[in-house]
Image (cartoon, rainbow, N blue to C red):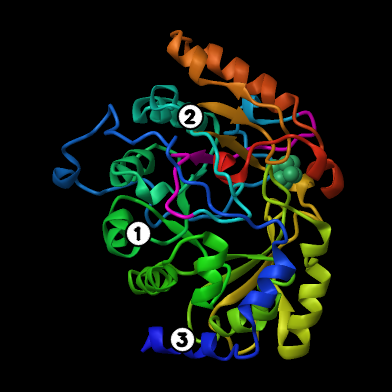
Amino acid sequence: MKAAKMRRYASKITDWHLGLRRLNFFLVNSEVRSYHSVLRSSKDDYRHKSVAKMNYATSCVNLSEDPPKEKDNRVSDMLIDSYGRMHTYLRISLTERCNLRCQYCMPAEGVDLTPKPELLSLTEILRLANLFVTSGVYKIRLTGGEPAIRKDIEDVCLHLSNLNGLKTLAMTTNGLTLARKLPKLKECGLTSINISLDTLVPAKFEFLTRRKGHEKVMESINAAIDVGYNPVKVNCVVMRGFNDDEICDFIELTRDRPINIRFIEFMPFDGNVWNVKKLVSYSEMLDRVVKKFPGLRRLQDHPTETAKNFKIDGHCGTVSFITSMTEHFCAGCNRLRLLADGNFKVCLFGPSEVSLRDPLRQHASDDELREIIGAAVKRKKASHAGMFDIAKTANRPMIHIGG
Ligand code: SF4
């Protein structure tokens, strides 16, 4: 029934001509390079065999997701930058591998993957995560690549959710292999889920992601609702000439379902052929939405919130805009990033990174690691450099950073 409803919204889009849009949107579209160089994954060196036998009494489940108050003295100096921002949110990229090849996430020719021995093991991820959580991080988001393709993803969730002090364990996923894993992931302490979906039209999905799978993503959204995630967040990168005509169709999904649709301004990353002409600004999106949904009203946002949140009268779900390009939210930034290769990144758009893996493998103590992390946090800039400078600055492709 739900799937039928979603298909009905999708089928409303009758005047769209795929070939013409392809020309409009990706002038530089080229063949997907084959991934001969991709290293095969092998089992992580830290497999806990006992997950099925363990009690899933986690420290995350059912705890409030409210961020701590501004002057929370549980946040150590290591996490406070020179502008007084408290970094209580850590995004951990669990893998550089992905089962899609989204055009805005990686270049058409693919990316070089880090050899497995140079990636953090689960033991190393847990040690660093523990260090961050005991220093004041209360929220961890798992990213990638595609985090759900890790064979040990349930173990990862179980161990992280048991960290004392962690309130939210979230995951951003493309939803391709998620549906059947969701009940177990929820049991293992995954408290919040964001599923990426940029179009309701299967043919456009295949074009953008260079893979099939639209139906599976829709299934995962339904499965997430069915197992009780509320809201289920759906991330949609809006790109002019590709999916900007679907904004109101996406909003229809919120009418009778606990979906938070999140429209994200198109951002420049290495190799994603960003162009300001493809950017649909927050104000333009808002104009279009208000015309169709006059009952749109702004919700109160927390100072560290990245999204501008709205509700439409009578709708079960909500609508948000992530305005990184036209109205950045750096002043309230509380995010840090740990990449799959162990590099630590204090800003999504800042090119500077410092390795935590190397000192970890040279037997650095927790205090020594804290010193490295604290020094990097103190060097964090007040804000990103602006979209045109970002577009010119060398950074990693999105698939390496994890968004
Ligand atoms: S651009 Fe950097 S400083 Fe600004 S919100 Fe994003 S991560 Fe934070």
Tell me: 25 left or right of 35.
right
Identify the element where label 1 is drawn. Answer: loop
Q: Quadrant of residue 353?
A: top right
Which mark is on residue 51?
Answer: none
Q: Which residue is at the far front?
A: 31
In this rendering, the label closer to the viewer, 1 or 2: 2
Identify the element where label 2 is drawn. Answer: loop
Vertical side of 321 occupied by 327: above or below: above
Q: Which residues are magenta?
A: 82-100
Name the residue carrying label 1: 177
Vertical side of 213 occupied by 174: above or below: above
User: Does the magenta segment cover residue 94?
Assistant: yes
In percent of width and height, residue 377 lies at 69, 27
In this rendering, the label closer to the viewer, 2 or 3: 2
Identify the element where label 3 is drawn. Answer: helix
Name the residue carrying label 3: 7
The quarter of the rendering in which ligand 1 is drawn is top right
What's the magenta bit mostly, secondary-structure-wise?
loop
Name the residue carrying label 2: 114
